[in-house]
Image: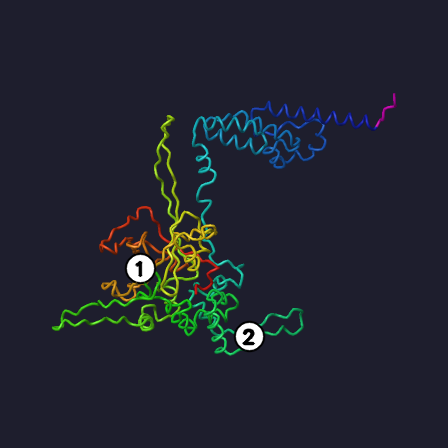
Amino acid sequence: MEETNPELEAFRRQWREEVSAKAGSSKSTESTKAPRRPPPIPRSSTGKLSQGHDGQEDHVEPQEFPGLDAPRRRESDVAESSKSSKEPQSALEHYEKAVERENQGSLGDSLSLYRKAFRMDHKVDQKYKSKHFPPSAFASKPSNPNPSNASPTVPNTAHDSLDGPPQSMKELIAGFSGLSIEPAPPIIENTPPPPCPIAKLPNEIMVSMLTELAILDFASFVRVAQVCKSLAYIVLTEEQIWKRICVGSEVGFGAMHYQWQREVLGGPLIEDPLDFQNDSEEDEATVPIVPPSKELVTETLLDSYSSSWQQMFRHRPRIRFNGCYISTVNYIRPGQASANQVTWNSPVHIVTYYRYLRFFRDGTVISLLSTDEPADVVHHLTKELQDTHREGGALYLPSAVMQNSLRGRWRLSTVLDNPEASLKDSESDLFVETEGANAKYMYRMKLALRNAGKGARNNKLVWQGFWNYNLLTDDTGVFTLRNDKAFFFSRVKSYGTGS
């Protein structure tokens, strides 16, 4: 046995005395009936506290906090004992108790309390939310439509929000009028910037270059507006370029046909000697009605589109040649149950087929009805493959689907087709005539040019009517359009500009 350390024994003795003194103090506190009276002071601490006992005001703080000299663990024990003595009664109290237990980490107790609360009231969670999180505490703040951290290159009015209301697109474009093309910054600081020859070109030469670009590739011409603000102003406001686009036959209205240009089978048009008669003349002489030229109609319609060639190009109905129009038809047909099996349900068949229309600049059109998907068809919609597969020839080729294609012609409507409509509204219809199933029939379609999507124009053809015409008996039959859907334009890159 090692010898005992006298200092350690003295420390243990002092510690036992303090513990016994504090235990006696807590017992005397619990036994007192008047809680506002201070607890009896232990004898071990009398020597230190008796000096200030003469003034009664020095003992106000111990009256309110009798356990200041006790350890922290004792305060929590007293609080838990006081809380445990009050058992929850209502569903809301059970829910609040469960939330408290969950925050303390007692998941088992909280789960039990949650179950009890929902058994008593299945909407107790809503009551807890309305009590502790009222709607007034979450008042919605107006969202900032113009964040200050927006990129300066974005056409956004975020940086102008301090100067007044946001600008319209027209006002924003007008603000680019005085800007010039800025060259690229220098690659290395304090060195001359790289050359930018296009920034030194006069405006007349720039307009001429952009006009040629618009004729060759209209999509690239529009994308030039994304380069800088100066080019964006020229692209969006230079009416000279847009007039050339509208009047030209590349992508404009010079390529539109408002009278038949071909026969149904694609041959040259044979003029019909029969024309409208003027009944007011006594000699009953025929007076042919000469339709106005396309250039004259285009000039006349300029005022209807706010005197803007750009607005005319965007909103005036026109046919597009760099792709084809596709109609996807889906419908369900009831089937027949098997005669050898007993079934409770009858089978159904989901039928899917496609209609294709590709228009050409010479006034002809190819019409095709097939069950093959567009990816296997659109690249074969050419006149050369149509002639190759006439009467079932070359069926071994991948383009054998063209053996069912039909030749035809197309034209847009005029004011003669819609006498009651204005000149602007009379051009919205499209007439298509194709060969029939055999030589004595001809199919006639009437479609309406519409817009589908937010920014796209003239990319939808809506059915107005579908007829078959008997060339021998001069009879007309009507096809029902119960399952047929509208045509939607799909660009095909292999077509190029459609020439």
Quadrant where the C terminus lies?
bottom left
Label 2 CA crowd tier, 10 Å (few <14, some 14–19, many 20+): few
Q: Residue furthest left?
A: 282
Classify residue 240 by image quadrant. bottom left
Classify residue 183 by image quadrant. bottom right
Between residues 98 and 188, which one lies in front from this camera angle? 188
Magenta span includes 361: no
State the CA–CA distance, disc 1 to disc 2.
47 Å
Q: Residue 142's spot in the image, x, y percent?
A: 45, 53
- Label 2 is placed on what type of residue? Ile
| Part of the protein shown in magenta | 1-6
Between residues 111 and 331, which one lies in front from this camera angle? 331
Vertical order, 306 against 432 (above or below): below
Q: Is residue 188 left or right of residue 200?
A: right
Q: Residue 21's spot in the image, x, y percent?
A: 70, 25
- Label 1 is placed on what type of residue? Phe
Q: Is residue 309 left or right of residue 227?
A: left
Between residues 424 and 53, which one lies in front from this camera angle? 424
Classify residue 331 by image quadrant. top left
Between residues 394 and 345, which one lies in front from this camera angle? 394
Q: Residue 346's spot in the image, x, y percent?
A: 36, 32
Q: Circle 2 sits on which residue?
A: 198
For marks 1 and 2 on the same chain, the one whose residue lies earlier in the sequence: 2
Q: Measuring 30% from the left and 66% from the top, which residue is drawn there?
A: 424
Vertical order, 91 against 165 (above or below): above
Judged from the image, the secondary structure of the residue bearing numbered disc 1 is strand
Numbered mark located on residue 431 in the image: 1
Judged from the image, the secondary structure of the residue bearing numbered disc 2 is helix
Q: How many numbered dots are placed on residues in this image?
A: 2
